[in-house]
Amino acid sequence: MTLRKSRAAVASSPEVEVAAEELLKKGNAVDAVVAGVFAACALYPGVLLGPVQILIGGGGVGLRAFDGRVRQPGIGAPRPRGFREDEEVPDAAKVGVPWLPATLSVAVATAGTATFAQVLAPALALAKGSPRHDVLTKIASRGPRAVEERPLGAELLVLAGRTSGGLLTSDDLSSQRPEVHPASRHVLGAAHAGRSGRGPRSSSPRDRNAKASPVDAPSEARTRFVYELPWSNDEGGLPIAPAGLVEVATTRAVAAVDRFGAFAIACWDEGASGLSIPELGLRAPFFATPVLRGETRVRPGDARAAAAPIALVGTDAGPEFGFAAFGASDAYEVLQGALRSVIEDDRIEAHGEARLVAVSHLSGIASALR
């Protein structure tokens, strides 16, 4: 179903979408997606300690990206000898440094309009009665420093520190310094400007092969661009999956557009596998690379690859559409198909197992494609 109004939000789960919509009434699109990610942290144990990646554009927020991928641990520690080929690698060695809380804090401070407490409020309501409520309350009061302080910091060091066979150090936990990056822009050809200025019409992407939907009635040709994360792998101007063994199917997303035409999309990983911290109701997902003898060591502090099948599409004036695909291993293929269909045919078309969601803002009208 497609809804048309002055602002819109859409997400991978109803609870996340409601959280984003709540902030969209009082803040901007950046506040909305940050609230959505925190809501996911409240609902699912593996989100808070995993990666987050955010793309924003238009409406006075600029075209920027926030890199909250998990970092390789080991800062301030002597280089370990590494595991031999015939040794069993402990799970602790696969746990990395979480940058999600710090990245969400920077996104709100840089481009949001709400307070940190306001964007956390929906998550705190969702987490009530679970151990994650205490963790999120600490984050609401202490910000990203909560990751290096008790109880979270202490539990992480016990779980994935050197005494458990891991690489995590206190220096790792205090190293979080997310930066704001310019988004990448690629010219992908001409499309038609719409007469009506109305958003896309579509059958729901929950259908595994969603039907094509007209974006606008065609009139004069104009050049369209794809805006994406600057660290994304790219092929022909379209984002492709990161190199290596990266889980794509567990990626989830929230997208929003506000009444000023500002877009924001955030994606995270549900962290299906990892080490549990029962006392906190959390799970530390596996994103770090263990040190192996005879192989080049990943430098401590380096960002670890994570899927982010998200992109913005627009003209030289700024974004008009925001897309996210998630829920299956073909998410990048579904995203690429949607991007091509908008740019080449002025239609939104999605074929595949992954879900596609989109928001648009045309002539002051916001639309959500679910």
Image (tube, grey):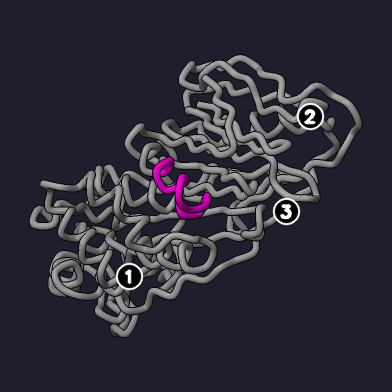
Give above or below for 252 relative to 333. Answer: below
Where is residue 115 drawn, in percent x and y?
Answer: 40, 63
Binning the other alpha carbons within 10 Å of mark 3 as few (below 14), some (14 to 19) or many (20 upward) gives: some
Instruction: Judge depth for marks 1 and 2 and give the one in front.
Output: 1
- Which amino acid does the dot numbered 3 rest on? Arg
- Which amino acid does the dot numbered 2 rest on? Glu
Q: Is residue 29 a member of the stretch shown in magenta?
A: yes
Give the farthest residue toward the front.
26
Mark closest to the chain's N terminus, 1 or 2: 1
Task: Determine the residue positioned at 68% across, 38% down.
Answer: 364
Task: Determine the residue positioned at 58% across, 36% down.
Answer: 359
Q: Is residue 139 left or right of residue 197?
A: left
Q: Which residues are magenta?
A: 20-32
Query: Mark 3 = which residue?
Result: 185
Where is residue 306 drawn, in percent x and y?
Answer: 45, 52
Nearer the observer, 157 or 210: 210
Give above or below for 249 relative to 33. Answer: above
Q: Is residue 170 left or right of residue 64?
A: left
CA gap between label 1 and label 3 equals 30 Å
Query: Mark 1 = which residue?
Result: 144
Query: Mark 2 = which residue?
Result: 344
Give above or below for 74 relative to 115. Answer: below
